[in-house]
Each structure stands twice: as C-alpha cells, then as structure tokens.
Image (cartoon, rainbow, N blue to C red):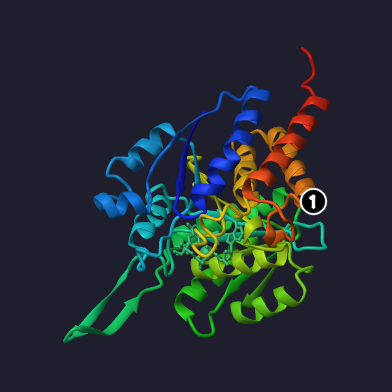
Amino acid sequence: MRIAVIPGDGIGGEVVPAVLPALELLGDHFGLGLSYRIFDWGAERWLAERVGLPPDALDLLASDYPAILLGALGDPRIPDMAHGRDILLGLRRGLDLYVNYRPFTPRGGDRTIALFRENTQGLYAGVGGTVSHGRHPAVAIDECVYTRETVEKFLRYCLRTLSESGRERVTLVHKSNAVPHTGRLWQGVFRAELAGFPGLVGSEEYVDSFCYHLVRDPSPYEGIVASNLFGDIVSDIGAALMGGLGLAASASVCPETGCALFEPVHGSAPDIAGRGIANPYAAATAVALMLDHLGHPRAAAPLRRALAAAARTDSATPDLGGHGTTGTFMADVMKRLEKDLADDRPEPR
Ligand code: NAD
Ligand code: IPM
Ligand code: MN
C-alpha cells in the first residue's frame, strides 16, 4: 500500500515528519505493508520553478497512491495562495475527492459530530473573473456552481455513511433565503435522498443561525451536510469546539475510486511556524483516518488512545495548555503507543 506524503508549507513541514514514525510503527506492528514517498510540492518549489501540482501528478497519484497525507499549504510570500489553489484544489478536483469528512468531538462531550463538506464545486468551482476599468478590477465575480449529479452522489454517500454509523439526525446547512438557486437544489435533493433512509431524521438550517446554535450548544447535532464554503467555515467552528485547530483532521474521498487525501483542518500557521510548537495531534488524527479508510481500524485505535492520553499531560503543546513541543508531544505519544502495542500483541496463529 503506497502513500503519497506532501508535507507542504509552514507547520505542515513540522507536523507531518513528526507523525510518520507512528505510521511506520503501526504499519510494521500490524503487518500492513505500507510504504510512502515524500513529494516536495509547495511554496518553495512554486517560488523556484513556478510548479505547483506537476503535470503528471494526478495520473501518478490515481494509479499508484490510494492514499495521500498532506500537511498544509500557504506561505506569506505568496499572498494570493496561487500555489495552494493549484495543489490543494487541484488534488481535490482532479481526483474528484468530492466528499470531505471533517469529524469533531466537542469538548466535554463524548459524541463525535460527523460533518460532511462537499469538496469540489460551489464557490470553489473556479468559475468567475474580473472586469477592469483602467488598472483596477471594477467588477469581480465568483460563481457558486452546483450540478445535481454531484449534490446527489455527495448527499447519498453522506446519508448512507451516517445511517451505517448508527446516527439518527442529519442537518442540512444552507442559505436558500439569500442564495436561492443552489440552495433550493440542495434542499430538493436532500429531501428526496432522505426518503431512502427511514432511520434518519433530517432538518434544515440557515447557515448563520446554524452557526449560532452550534456554538451555543452542539449537543443536538449528530450529522451535518454542507456545501463547500459553508462546510469549510463550520469545520473551523468544529475545531474550536474541540479545543483548537491543532486537533481537527479531515478525509477527502472519492467513493467510486477509493482515492483519498488526509490532512489537518488547519493551515500552515505562519504565526507559529519554525518555533517547534505546532500541535501534531491533527496530523496524527489524519493518519488515524487514513488507517480507518485503508481498512485497518485496529491500527488506528491505539494511535487515537495514545494521542488522547498524551494531550492531557504537560508534554502537550501550548495550544492545549502544555509546555511541550511538537517533538516532546510525539515522543510521549510514541512511548504510549509502544506500550499499548506490547500489551496487546496480535493473537498467535
Ligand atoms: P491556520 O489554520 O494556519 O491558523 C489559524 C490559527 O490556528 C493560528 O493562530 C495558528 O497558529 C493556529 N494553529 C493552526 N494549526 C495549529 C497547530 N497544529 N498547532 C497550534 N496552533 C495551530 O489559518 P490561517 O492563519 O488563516 O492560514 C495560514 C495559511 O494556511 C494561509 O495561507 C491559508 O490560506 C492556509 N490554509 C491552508 C489550509 C490547507 O492547506 N488545508 C487550511 C487552512 C488555511
Ligand atoms: C481548508 C482550507 C482550504 C479550503 C483553503 C486553504 C483553500 O481552508 O482546507 O479548510 O478553503 O478548503
Ligand atoms: Mn478551512
């Protein structure tokens, strides 16, 4: 099983190398036959060669790498994020990773809310432009584009996954009062697809009041489905409810091909990059999501246990209230993981 690893920019280049030893240890222990190759796509390469996603990248990934681990993209030297759109949005759209699963577990609760974000269309469809008068753009347009086909296959996959996970409630987040065309398309498809899942109770909320209710009390929510930009914004709120962006991870999946990309929800965090204090929890949880996806939940579970236990100690990074560094935290995680695996040897055949 080959994994493409793209550390990327800023703290991406700190947290991804920090979590690879955990992936190696689990791969060896459970005999998963994992190997990985590191790709240097990111700001440095863009600035040096103007190469974002190399021309052969999508074919290579689609044929040889069923899983991709990405750190983050974003560099203050490239303020328009041209390289980030080329690489990140290029991968999401180019590999048709239309389902973005961003689970979050609000602090103090024990239930994980399953947030699904459509990942390829909407305001990210790349449709738009500017009309200039003189040197400045006088009109700027970014179109929100949705096809029924994508909304249908996205919502059908989400509802099936939610119902298989035993969840009973799902909320559609939309803004059909102000953005009626795509909003009504989503509502119509949501209602039609729900009919196929009698165990699920659907509700619909405007994104503004939804955010208000989620922050005040997340406990009524079990599953959330949202279009691209709304899901992006809600996932950062979800991270805040967990206790910080250092904790939240995400999986972008094409259910038809099985191709998938795993990454933290956070970005390259230039404000703390280079200081060794980035929290690797989210990147490690992205590894756990990857192991789940590859069919190895038994390998993901001890990693999640070790992360949760280490996060409660002083070895945790400052965003969690600890005095640790990326390195001390992962050293603590590895120690716990090794002990957990030694205590729980696979059954002899
Ligand atoms: P950010 O997520 O990078 O950071 C927001 C805040 O959270 C910062 O204060 C940061 O220090 C903190 N933070 C984030 N991750 C952390 C971690 N692991 N440990 C401790 N603290 C952490 O968002 P931003 O500052 O708005 O964006 C920075 C750059 O990253 C921008 O170029 C943006 O476009 C890009 N970005 C990329 C991705 C991605 O690659 N998927 C996601 C979000 C933002
Ligand atoms: C994310 C990020 C990206 C997005 C940006 C960097 C393009 O915010 O992965 O959440 O908007 O999807
Ligand atoms: Mn985001």
Residue 18 x %, y %: 58, 42
Q: Quadrant of the C terminus?
A: top right
Residue 303 x %, y %: 71, 39
Nearest the eye: 189 or 129: 129
Residue furthest to the left: 134
Nearest the eye: 69 or 222: 69
Q: Is mark 1 within 8 Å of ligand 1?
A: no
Amino acid at the residue labelled 1: Thr
- Residue 112 in view here: yes
Residue 45 in the figure: left or right of residue 26: left
Residue 103 x %, y %: 66, 56
Residue sitting at 43 percent across and 53 percent down? Answer: 92
- Residue 30 in view here: no
Q: Quadrant of residue 102?
A: bottom right
Residue sitting at 33 percent across and 38 percent down? Answer: 59
Which type of secondary structure does the marked residue at label 1 adopt? loop
Within 10 angstroms of label 1, few (less than 14), some, or many (20 or more) residues? Answer: some
Q: Which residue carries the number 1 mark?
A: 313
Compared to 249, does 26 lie above or below?
above
Residue 346 x %, y %: 77, 21
Nearest the eye: 245 or 270: 270
Residue 53 in the figure: left or right of residue 191: left
Residue 41 in the figure: left or right of residue 178: left
